[in-house]
Amino acid sequence: VQLQASGGGLVQAGGPLRLSCAASERTLSSYAVGWFRQAPGNKREFVATISRNGEATHYGDSVRGRFKVSRDNVRNTVYLQMNSLKPEDTAVYYCAARSQVTAQTIYVSESSYDYWGQGTQVTVSS
């Protein structure tokens, strides 16, 4: 499956931004989806994940309470709503998908994912 992350941009600290992850060719409803981010000079970091049926989610410590992951399986899209953004949230954000999953399993490790999108830049100004 090919993934397309979009919605990044420049936002002031404290503001919101919503990222989208869309799939081409195949339905994203068959996959668990994760969001990761990578800032310059840093390792890729886990941000959030959502199960195939949308009933289970998990967040990284640095974003918990500010970010919310959701999915619309009719629109074949997964969203990452980011609120109360901080300059340290500046990074390239990637979505990833894992196939052959149970309905409610979630995955936090990069190595768990089979497919990756190209990333979208999020820049938070202070």
Image (cartoon, rainbow, N blue to C red):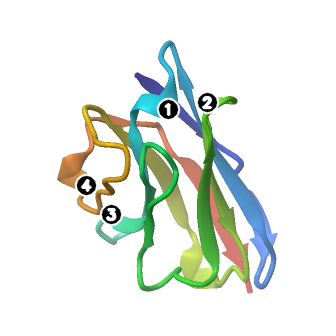
Element type where label 4 sits in the image: helix
Disc sitting over residue 110 in the figure: 4
Which residue type carries mark 1? Ser
Which residue is denoted by mark 2 in the rendering?
Answer: 76
Which residue is denoted by mark 1 in the rendering?
Answer: 29
Q: Are marks 2 and 1 in contact (CB under 8 Å)?
A: yes
Drawn side of residue 66 relative to residue 105, left or right: right
Q: Residue furthest left?
A: 111
Look at discs 3 and 1 and give the one toward the viewer: 1
Q: Earlier in the sequence, mark 2 or mark 1?
A: 1
Q: Earlier in the sequence, mark 1 or mark 4?
A: 1
Q: Is residue 86 visible?
A: yes
Which residue type carries mark 3? Arg
The span from disc 2 to disc 1 (Cα, nearest Å) is 7 Å
Q: Crowdedness of circle 2 by 10 Å Cα count: few (<14), some, many (20+)? A: some
x and y percentages locating residue 90 in the rendered image = 58, 71
Which residue is denoted by mark 3 in the rendering?
Answer: 44
Element type where label 2 sits in the image: loop
The span from disc 4 to disc 3 (Cα, nearest Å) is 8 Å
x and y percentages locating residue 19 in the rendered image = 66, 52
Q: Crowdedness of circle 1 by 10 Å Cα count: few (<14), some, many (20+)? A: many
Look at discs 4 and 3 and give the one toward the viewer: 4
Q: Earlier in the sequence, mark 4 or mark 3?
A: 3
Look at discs 1 and 4 and give the one toward the viewer: 1
Q: Are marks 4 and 3 in contact (CB under 8 Å)?
A: yes
Element type where label 1 sits in the image: helix
Image-quadrant location for residue 88:
bottom right
